[in-house]
Structures are given as C-alpha cells and as structure tokens.
C-alpha cells in the first residue's frame, strides 16, 4: 500500500514538473491600447520580462506621453535581418493621445508570428510616428530560460528524481516476484 502511494506521488510530481517546463506563457490576443503599466509613465518602447524564450509571444509596449502622436509604421526585425510588418489590430495609423498614459501592447503574433518568436538572437522593434520620432528597442530571444526561482529549480530536478523513483519502484517489484 505504501509503495503504491509513493508511486502515485512520484507520478504527480513528474507530471507537475512537465507542466511547469511546458508552460511558455503564450497568450492569444491582438495588439490593443492599454493603460500604461509603468509608474512613472515612460515614452518609448519596452519589452517586459526579457529575455524571451523561443516560441514566446512577448509583451512589448509602445508608450507616448509628451505629445499626441500617430504611429504610422511598426516593424519587428529578427536576427536574420528579416522585417516583419505589423498586421495586428487596430490597423495603422494608431493615435496615442498626450497625457492619457496609454500604451500600445504588442506581441509577436501582431507581426504574423503566431507561434511566437521563431529565432534565437537579438531582435529589434522599430516604430515610426507622426510627428516624426522613431523609436527603436532591442531585446534577446534565447533557447531556454529557467527562472531563478524555486519553480525553475524544481522543473529541472523533479523529472530526474521522478525517473529514478519510478525505476526503483519497478526494480523492487521485479525482485519481489
């Protein structure tokens, strides 16, 4: 009976660690104008929670506070210097009014990359506005990032422990027969 309980606990631990590792944080929604997540408000482009993992959608914010600006063009440039044009909603041009502390929230899917960032390396976002003031922001996409937290540590350690525990249980069953 006790072996069976241990076996079930090991299976639950292994499944939980697989779920933690498999979660890439992908969310599926279009670009939209949102209240600024920054206090104090900023003017420019920021990619939050970088570096991104391969396949993540990312959270990129374009914020304008000094004057009303119309965003006329947005491009995402991958490490191979391929330009991905903005195809999200709302369509261009997008007007961000002065003083409303509003930001345009973008993700990789707004540039036709529905599976998220598809290349490892340095990416850039270029935004042109009217009146003319280009914004450029560079960020990195890596193969795999394990957060420096207990969840990241468990995600690495638990599958090995689970495999060893499963092997030990099966080995002890074979010996008792």
Image (spheres, rainbow, N blue to C red):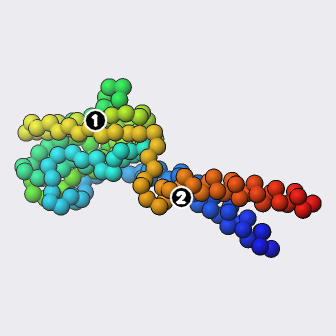
Q: Residue 96's x, y, as percent?
A: 15, 50
In this view of the protein, can residue 174 be seen by the observer? yes
The mark found on residue 124 in the picture is 1
23 vs 59, left or right, is right
Q: Residue at x 17, y 39 (%)?
A: 135
67 vs 80, left or right, is left
Q: Residue 73's x, y, as percent?
A: 21, 36
Distance from Cα at disc 2 to Cα at disc 1: 33 Å
Q: Secondary structure at mark 2?
A: helix
Q: Quadrant of residue 123?
A: top left
The mark found on residue 12 in the picture is none
Residue on which the image places disc 2:
154
**Disc 2: CA contacts within 10 A as few (<14), some (14-19) or many (>=20):** some
Mark whose residue sits in front, 2 or 1: 2
> Quick check: marks 2 and 1 in contact, CB under 8 Å?
no
Task: Please determine whether, in this image, residue 158 is positioned above or below residue 92.
Answer: below
Q: Residue at x 60, y 57 (%)?
A: 158
Q: How many callouts does the rendering have? A: 2
Q: Residue at x 73, y 71 (%)?
A: 5
């Amino acid at each position: 009976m006790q072996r069976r309980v241990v076996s079930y606990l090991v299976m639950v631990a292994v499944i939980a660690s697989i779920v933690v590792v498999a979660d890439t944080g992908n969310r599926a929604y279009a670009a939209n104008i949102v209240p600024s997540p920054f206090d104090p408000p900023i003017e420019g482009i920021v990619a939050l929670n970088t570096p991104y993992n391969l396949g993540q959608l990312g959270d990129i914010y374009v914020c304008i506070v000094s004057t009303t600006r119309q965003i006329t063009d947005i491009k995402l440039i991958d490490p191979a210097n391929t330009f991905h044009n903005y195809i999200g909603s709302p369509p261009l041009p997008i007007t961000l009014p002065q003083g409303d502390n509003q930001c345009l929230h973008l993700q990789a899917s707004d540039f036709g990359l529905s599976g998220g960032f598809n290349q490892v390396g340095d990416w850039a976002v270029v935004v042109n506005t009217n009146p003319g003031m280009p914004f450029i922001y560079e960020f990195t996409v890596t193969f795999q990032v394990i957060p420096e937290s207990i969840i990241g540590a468990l995600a690495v350690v638990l599958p090995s422990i689970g495999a060893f525990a499963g092997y030990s249980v099966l080995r002890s069953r074979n010996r008792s027969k």
